[in-house]
Image (cartoon, helix red, strand yellow):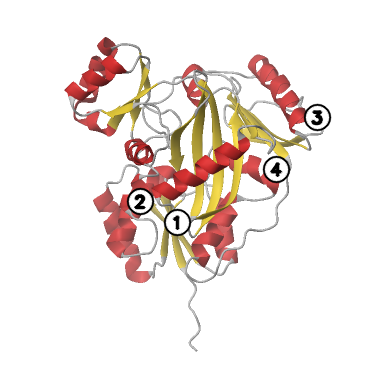
Amino acid sequence: MPEQKPLTILCVTSYEKGQEFIRTSKAMGCRVLLLTVEKLKDGDWPRECLDGIFTMPEDLPLQGLIYSVSYIGRSQRIDRIVALDEFDMENVSALREHLRIPGMGLTTVRYFRDKLSMRARAKEAGIAVPEFVPVLNYDDLREYMARVPPPWLLKPRSQASGIGMKKIHSPDELWPWLDQLGDQQSFYLLEHFVPGTVYHVDSIASEREVVFAEAHKYGTPPLTTSHQGGVFTTSTLPPDAPEYTELLVLNQKVLGELGFVRGVTHAEFLKADSDGKFYFIEVAARVGGAFISDVIEAATGINLWREWARLEVGAGRESYQLPPHRREYAAVILSLAKQEHPDTSAYNDPELLQHISKYHHAGLILKAASSARLQELIISYAERFQQDFLATQPVPDKPTF
């Protein structure tokens, strides 16, 4: 039999992330190419694992991206294209369809990028979501605001981390914002703001089956920390927590109804203060940001970037086997810092696993044998962070590279 040629994987990203995906793909015998924005050409990439680095301008339109990747394809046989960051997912799906390369196409990826698409599909499937309306027909907007009590969130359909969101308290507040948006209005939705506790479930799925899922509980909801400032925390939810099983079942239903086949996901759910019900907020077909992957690896030994690479490389060639993993508890504590390079050396409990080094950010990864001990540390450290480091800045209207 002829020798099987190694797969060539093109990784596309506008952010500096996914290094472990690159390393794992290379270790599995793949040729790995990287296409990133020009300012990240000299970033912290594992160059020993890359068979080529290509650059593109920021905000390159899709047509230009198709031209660029097609040009690369003249000399490089491309077998897989992977978006390492959420903001590149739609363009990469369009590339796959144009070049007829296996992977998630545009129709499916909309369910994991477009907040309107994912909400509409979830609602059709009987999954509870906050009341919403597309920003399109003004009569529909008026009817919605008369029926659903404020406040509401004006949300971009394809952003993340609270970027571009506005909290609206009355109809008179909405119309000036829509005037500012102009022709961009239809790229937004209006959603009921539901106070509550926010959770996330991070998963690995293979051939439509969720083979690994970890539930976590945020401290202050991410929307609050991004818009009002504060210390961001998230931690492993213990299996005996009353919410644990319900979250995993709900996560499985969401991924099934949205047609997810294989890869990693980050889904967010809200437990409402008013009725105690869980509401689906959003899901992305990517590794969670804000060091969530580090928390999962600390608690379980599972590296989501590594497993994502194994799924991509093995798709259609070999069945996926989840590696052995453990059950411990981990958390991240993170905040904007007034210092350029904050000194966190005074935080030195035995449960401290990692100091996060990031410009104008203070952060720690913690690991403990019990959830009770972890929560004790989170409360203590979050209070100290507010005194030692905390700074605030307005949330941007669009992502910064």
Three-letter residue code for mark 2? Thr
Q: Mark 3 to mark 4: distance in Å? A: 17 Å
Measuring from the top left, give residue 157's x and y in whole percent: 33, 34
Three-letter residue code for mark 1? Val
Mark found first going from the N terminus, 1 or 3: 1
Measuring from the top left, give residue 224's x and y in whole percent: 50, 20
- Furthest toward the right, the residue is 350
Measuring from the top left, give residue 136's x and y in whole percent: 21, 29
Three-letter residue code for mark 3? Asp
Of tags 1 and 3, the one toward the viewer is: 1
Q: Quadrant of residue 390?
A: top right
Q: Nearer the viewer, residue 82 or 357?
A: 82
| Residue at position x 53%, y 39% in the image | 289
Asked whether, in this view, residue 313 is left or right of residue 368, the answer is left
Q: In the drawing, what numbered circle is on residue 349?
A: 3
Q: In the drawing, what numbered circle is on residue 33?
A: none
Q: Mark 4 to mark 1: distance in Å? A: 25 Å
Q: Dot 4 corresponds to which residue? A: 299
Marks 2 and 4: CB-CB under 8 Å? Answer: no
Of tags 2 and 4, the one toward the viewer is: 2
- The local crowd at label 4, few if under 14, some if 14 to 19, many if 20 or more residues have their Cα within 10 Å, is many
Q: Mark 1 to mark 3: distance in Å? A: 41 Å
